[in-house]
Amino acid sequence: MMAVRHTGDQPEIGIDPATFHRIAEIVYQKAGIVLHRQKEALVVARIGKRMRQLGITHFREYLRRLEESPEHEELVEMLNAISTNVTHFFREPKHFEHLAGWLARWRLEGRTSFRFWCAASSSGEEPYSMGMVIREKLPADSDVRILATDLSTRALAEAREGVYTAKDMEKVPEAYAHRYFTCEAAKGDHRFRVHPALGKMITFARLNLAQTPYPMRGPFDAIFCRNVMIYFDDDVRRRLLCECWRLLRPNGYLVVGSAESLAGLPTDFKNVAPSVYVKS
Ligand SMILES: C[S@@+](CC[C@H](N)C(=O)[O-])C[C@H]1O[C@@H](n2cnc3c(N)ncnc32)[C@H](O)[C@@H]1O
C-alpha cells in the first residue's frame, strides 16, 4: 500500500516497498551506500525534492526515469540527492594536529615533496583545512598536491568554487581566515573566497569509493577518508581499505572519522591514535 503524506498544502505520495527496495538496490550497486528500511523517510525527502524539480509525482515514475536515463545522467543526480554532505572546516580538530606534527617531522627529515588524498571531500572544507595546515607548516615553495575526491558532483562544484558563508567560516581561526580567504560583499552579506594559493594545491575530481580499483597510483603520504565508511557495508569497506593500503607509501597514514574504526576488518593497518592508522 502506498502511504500518502501531506506537507502543508502539498500532497506527497509515499514510496511503495518494491520501489524503495529497487532504489536502495541501485544506490548500493552504484555507490556502496546501504539504505535500510529505516532510511525511507530520508529517501522520500531527498528524492522527493529531485522529483519536484523534474515535475514527477510518483516514485515509480521516477524509478523508470532513473533506469532509462541515457548516460546515467539521472543516476548522478540521484546520488547527489541521496548523499549526506555534512562537513565543516577543521572537523575533528585532533586530526589536523596530527597532520601538523607529521609535516614538522617530515620536514626535519629533509623531505620537500608531499602527496595527500582527501577521499570524501564533500564541499571542500576538509581539503582546504588540510591545505591551511600544510601552508602553515611548510615553506611556500614546497611541492605539495592534495587530491580531493567525492561522489557528489554538486558537492564537488561547491568545493571547486571555494566560496563560503560567514557561518561556514565559524571554525576557521581568525588569522587563517585573513591569510587564506578574501572577504567579498554579496547581497548585503559577506562571502569568503578561498585564496588562489590554497586552491592551486588541490585537484578536485569525482571518484566513487565503491568502485575499486581506483584510477590512481599514489603513493600518498596520508589519506583522510573520514565519515564516509559509515555509509558502506563491510564488503565495500574491505575493498576501500585494500586500496588505501596500496595507495599509501610505507609509514603513510590513514585517517578515518572518529565514529569509524577498522576493528573487525581484515587489515594490516596499525592503530596509532584514535581513528589514525599507519601502514607499517
Ligand atoms: C558526511 S560527508 C563527510 C565529509 C568529510 N569527509 C568530513 O568528514 O567532514 C560524506 C561524503 O562522502 C561522500 N560519499 C558517499 N558515498 C561515496 C562514494 N561511494 N564514493 C565517494 N564519496 C562518497 C558524500 O558525497 C559526502 O560528501
Image (cartoon, rainbow, N blue to C red):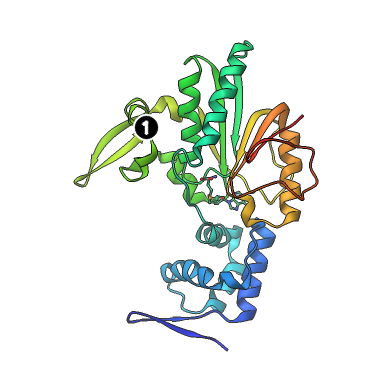
At x 57%, y 69%, the residue is 39
220 or 49: nearer the viewer: 220
Tell me, yes or no, if residue 43 can be seen here.
yes
Q: Mark 1 belongs to which amino acid?
A: Pro
Q: Which residue is mark 1?
A: 173
> Quick check: 140 above or below 7?
above
Seen from the viewer's position, the closer of residues 97 and 19 is 97
Quarter-of-image position of residue 144: top right
| Drawn side of residue 6 relative to residue 260, left or right | left
> Residue 132 placed where, x, y %?
45, 28
From this viewpoint, which residue is outermost toward the bottom? Answer: 1
Looking at the image, residue 210 sits to the left or right of residue 63; the answer is right
Residue 192 in the image: x percent, y percent? Answer: 32, 37
Residue 107: image quadrant is: top right
The quadrant in which the N terminus is found is bottom right
Query: Does the beta carbon of the residue at mark 1 sit less than 8 Å from ligand 1?
Result: no
Q: Is residue 207 above or below residue 202?
A: below
Please tell me which residue is depicted at 65% across the width and 62% down the height of the picture.
34
- Quadrant of image for the C terminus: top right
Residue at 45%, 42% (x, y): give it.
159
Question: Can residue 200 be seen here?
Answer: no
Q: Residue 121 at x, y = what percent?
A: 53, 42
Q: In this picture, is 67 found above or below 237?
A: below
